[in-house]
Amino acid sequence: MMAAMTLENLLHEPELRPFLPLLYLAWADGSMGRDERRVIQARIDAQPWLKPRMRVALEAWLADAPPDAVTLAKLREAIVSSVGTLSSEARRSLVGIAESIAALDGDAREALDELERTLGLSSTELALARVSEPATTPAPSFDASRVQELLDGRFAGTRDRARAFLAAPQHRSLYGVDSATHRREVYAWLGELAKEGFGALAYPGVTCEAADGLGPFLATFETLGLGDLSLAVKFGVQFGLWGGSVYFLGTPEQQRAYLPRVASLEAPGCFAMSEVGHGSNVADLETLVRWVPKSGEVEGHFVLHTPSESARKDWAGNAALHARWATVFAQLEVGEQRHGVHAFVVPIRDAKGEALPGIRLGDVGHKLGLNGVDNGRIWFDHVTIPRDALLGRYASVSAEGVYSSPIESPSRRFFTMLGTLVGGRIAVATSGMSAAKLGLAIAIRYASARRQFGAASEPETLLLDYPSHQRRLLPHLAAAYAFHFALDDVRERFLAREPDDDTRELEAEVAGLKAGATWHVSAALQACREACGGQGYLSVNRLADARADTDVFTTFEGDNTVLMQLLAKGLLTGFKKQIAERGALRFVASHFLDSVALRNPITSRDTSEETFRASARQLALLELREAMLLQSVARRVQKRIAAKADPTIAANEVQEHLLALAGAHVDVLTLRAFRDAVARTNGEEREVLDRLRALHGLVLLEKHTAWFLENGVFEAGPARTIRRLVPELFAEIRPHAVTLTDAFGIPDNCLAAPIAFSDPARPRW
Amino acid sequence: MMAAMTLENLLHEPELRPFLPLLYLAWADGSMGRDERRVIQARIDAQPWLKPRMRVALEAWLADAPPDAVTLAKLREAIVSSVGTLSSEARRSLVGIAESIAALDGDAREALDELERTLGLSSTELALARVSEPATTPAPSFDASRVQELLDGRFAGTRDRARAFLAAPQHRSLYGVDSATHRREVYAWLGELAKEGFGALAYPGVTCEAADGLGPFLATFETLGLGDLSLAVKFGVQFGLWGGSVYFLGTPEQQRAYLPRVASLEAPGCFAMSEVGHGSNVADLETLVRWVPKSGEVEGHFVLHTPSESARKDWAGNAALHARWATVFAQLEVGEQRHGVHAFVVPIRDAKGEALPGIRLGDVGHKLGLNGVDNGRIWFDHVTIPRDALLGRYASVSAEGVYSSPIESPSRRFFTMLGTLVGGRIAVATSGMSAAKLGLAIAIRYASARRQFGAASEPETLLLDYPSHQRRLLPHLAAAYAFHFALDDVRERFLAREPDDDTRELEAEVAGLKAGATWHVSAALQACREACGGQGYLSVNRLADARADTDVFTTFEGDNTVLMQLLAKGLLTGFKKQIAERGALRFVASHFLDSVALRNPITSRDTSEETFRASARQLALLELREAMLLQSVARRVQKRIAAKADPTIAANEVQEHLLALAGAHVDVLTLRAFRDAVARTNGEEREVLDRLRALHGLVLLEKHTAWFLENGVFEAGPARTIRRLVPELFAEIRPHAVTLTDAFGIPDNCLAAPIAFSDPARPRW
């Protein structure tokens, strides 16, 4: 509070403004060194023109306790907005900054000149250099903003709006606060997002233009992953899951009745699918909805009930505190007949936030991360709900109690309903990827400024110049680009789909990419945290929370291992269909001709380094691996089915093969997407991106070397070439590493970590 | 509070005691189901003999909010102590439990019979079964307690005392509390540990018997890793680092002056080595101590100073709040001469906890985990310290200002001082391993009770029966045993060392095992957390905190990547020495004869499954890999040195090879130790442990298949054998998995996670 008040004082005293940069820079690393304090105090003492109240305001900033992050960010905003208009020459000088902030008379100017000289030799030098122009760093070989354009794609405008939201100091990611405070803040932010119209983007044709479909909504969700991840998840729960269930499963009347209030946050809600006994296996949910026919005056209606403790609704975000509505998934019984899982809109809290009669609500409690999200539990005790509570796009029950559905097969109906989750999986994967990009930007910036050990009588070596450090970070940088492009591709296909399209292949690929991407996020953030040593363990440096918050991304919106099997089964189905249509031989011939040719020693003699860097050879090898795994899995499954094994048991027996197959397909998707994205560029960035693509491909080939050797696809020679090429690529990419993270377009207010701003040659704050 | 008060009431009303198990079981999973509540309420209502105040006391337990963990644990203790004396027959019945707790008249007994019948069909059945005898589970094929004996080794008594401490309900691991509360509790626990004499174990010959050396202290530290890891780390900081620095670097007088008060916690202190600019590179610390000669009345003394912000002491545990002393590492200057890094004992806070003059103290702030430990920062401003503040075992300055040391070479002196860290590295590795064992016990118990999906019309499949789930957990179970035995071996060598022994080889191996073990801990806990899905993300289930707390174990007490290079350099030095002594050929011949023979196709024709399961072949292959990597790295380094490259730069260039070499040696150490441990067993457990050893070896061989194929050590055939054997071993070990975690001897109060107690057939609470 103290700091906040004195900030106001500072901003209102023009004569004090020259001190702003000084104070900001002294505090920006979270603590003020003794030398810094002494120099500033001496300067304050030496200013004859300072009035006593100004002196008090300034000295308050020299207290032991650092100003809080929000105050510091506000201070920075004030400085930056003044500096923005200066020439780069003027910016290089502290006096220049000061001049832009306040008109100075001669005396003050002289004092500041002296201040600058004094500081020039003190330990604040480094910090001061942060707002100066780079002196010796060579200009990057390509323009980060052009790569950012490529990454941002066609919804760049929405992304920029979301970035602007996150760039506001009051929206900075929280840490070290108690859950109650965190939840309250996140809910307030969610309200601001709704007010700025971000929620309305979720329902094209109802609450916003239909033209771009869900594109802008997904772009917003993705961008929010750069900030406090509790906000991203809360955003997804309210607008994606709760509102999305009404949007995708409801009738036009139901959409109009609920969605405007969902978008404005007047109707906060939750998505009650998972039960404590039934996480992944949603088809076996126990919660029951029975149809009660009209009787006398009482209209026909449903009764919703939790029949056992294992049927308790669990994990629903928003349910512990804020939701007043829930979309409840339950087994529908009409008369004697069970129709499988259906979705119902159910009010659960009154306006005061009290549970409605028959409803009991609980809190899942403290979690590893995402404590700004109020995950809850729900029990229903014979709750009466009206007939139109059933979301009616795929099923309805008439006033006379007759069930009907446009989809006859119950299992197809169920999977059609689940198919609506595909957008959520894209959203979770991309917003998790934003956290990985954030982590990579922080860790790579730190590694390009922090020195440790080194040759005698030289400055210590920069961390990023160590091969082992490059090995830790650069493969994840390449994978971040690769998954970005692959997710871009499936998102475009998702946006382009027509209502009656068969989207099963798309769903399978999204499932696989969600799993692959979120595993990548965990691994990348873990590597970043470790690469920053103890600094990475401090909450202020953001990596710890980003890692902990995204950890559950591998579990929610579908457990990754389950999703990978979904993809593998999709691949098997496609294989069977193609075999049936074209015959096995022709299938292999047409689909894998190039790849198979590679196994022929005559055509694969070209093992030059150039060949292994090229996308053609890399892709051919990975496609061959997928094809061979596919055939091998298919053979294993068929053998078991021929022996009349239960299909589920058969699938279990080949589970490891299924997972390998799905992984192989994800590899192909990412490398293919990366190749295609590079082909769309044409400036100086093309070469760097192509090297990054080459690194991604080589790392994948290196990872599967054992398989290639074992299956005779190549011999020891190529294996060695690949192993030699990987560090070569590290060295080629290393000079561009920071610029490649600049292209992520992460606002400084998200980057936030002090260690991300320790390079004097890379001014951003 | 409410629950705690009513607990007292319950314990003081004999007639209420029959309700205790009921209430405990209803709440034990963290929430009381509606059915449970209704049944209990009905039973309360139906007891004519209940007085109104008893009724109130009981009904208070039916509130919405669950009782806190400590209250619940106390309740459990009360029940368990009553149940303990019952026959197993009587224990199987709720009435039996009730009888043991209170004498019942006929009416009450009948009511309880009815209660039991009612509950028999309700959802509490599962919970109730927890205190009943197992009904259908087959007896394990070996006795877990015999394996526990093997694991506990010769300090089993100390371990049991530490376990008893952790088993007390009030010492249960904390989560979701604010840092201030967490720090306060941990400090109070530390005081209890000191009072029970655990701190005194750290200084054999000074504060405890010398006979067992540091064995009991290290066993305590290891055991504490099963509880709140903040306590383990705080214990290590106070008794290991702070007291240990005086013990290892001080003179007998200094030991006697400080250590009794360190052991009793009268003198809390910290270990101020790392500086913000110098984490791993300790030799380049900047903090300065200058000798000021006698002048007039003023005796000769030292002045301690922080010359720049990068010299700020950082990360010191205990420094932010509790430490009144610090061992400060600083560059010693006497006259014009620099003598390198030395250690000084410096008071930093007065009795009221205020910083002493010239000393500024800070807090590193919130962290990913271990927030019960107060890591801090220290700045010194020309602080005067007396001559005897210099810890004098390896160096002293006379009253006349003459520096002397029993070790002439400054670099050898420095490394001798650092050598005292080796005990700390064993402690960190083993206590981290305890957390991994805890996680494995929780995840494996859950996986052997939780069902999801499955064949049609069958009960759903247990998670642990899925091959992919076995793949997630069982290799880590095998590695937990392997690292346990390997760390046991180096600990015994550490305990057996004599003062003048050359311990560099031991130090190098400890460095490598610390790195390997703590990386294993991170990977194992991550796998456990993911294997438990959303449940694993909840703090109540312990995996989240265990994972977050141990994450920094890979960084502190030496960054793992740096430590692995230390090991690799040690191996290279040993190699050079042996070559010099015996000639290259003889060295290879004598050391790797068996291994090299394996490369000969004539002698390695035996590729049967039996051979690849046997420890002889597994070890020979891994030793061969290490030997070949060693020769290859040595050749690369020599080539660079011959070309007159700077040795540091040369080492950087082969850094990836060094890391591979160190990893290969750690593989060998773990497998060798596992083999030797199995050889020491002779009961039924031997076969199971040997299979677990075989799995560990096979997983290592599988991991390095690419290398073996590429280097022509074996062909595709053996590679396939290995890949086929791994899941075979999974299936063989799976039935014993839970018993293998029982052998870790983890108190229920540490296991604590509700998901660890979800198997009705495995009663422990």
Image (cartoon, coloured by chain):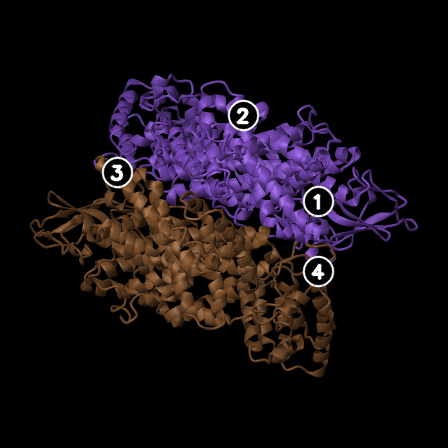
Chain colours: A purple, B brown
| Disc 2 with disc 1 on a shared chain | yes
Location of residue B606 with respect to A613 vertically, above or below? below
Which chain does the residue under circle 1 lie in? Answer: A
Disc number lying in front (2 or 4): 2
| Residue nearer the viewer, A735 or A679 | A679
Marked residue nearer the N-terminal end (4 or 3): 4
Circle 2: is it few (<14), some (14-19), or many (20+) Cα within 10 Å?
Answer: many
Give the mark toward the camera: 1 or 3. 3
Percent across and percent down for residue A363 are: 62, 52
Q: Is residue B573 visible?
A: yes
Residue on which the image places disc 1: A326
Quadrant location of the N terminus of chain B? bottom right
**Element under disc 1:** strand
* SS category of the residue bearing label 2: helix
For label 3, the residue is B639
The amino acid on which the numbered mark 1 sits, given as a three-letter code, is Ala
| Residue B38 spot, x, y in % from top left | 72, 64
| Residues indicated by labels 4 and 3 sit on the same polypeptide chain | yes
Cα gap from disc 2 to disc 1, whole angstroms: 41 Å
**Chain letter behind tag 4:** B
Residue indicated by mark 2: A677
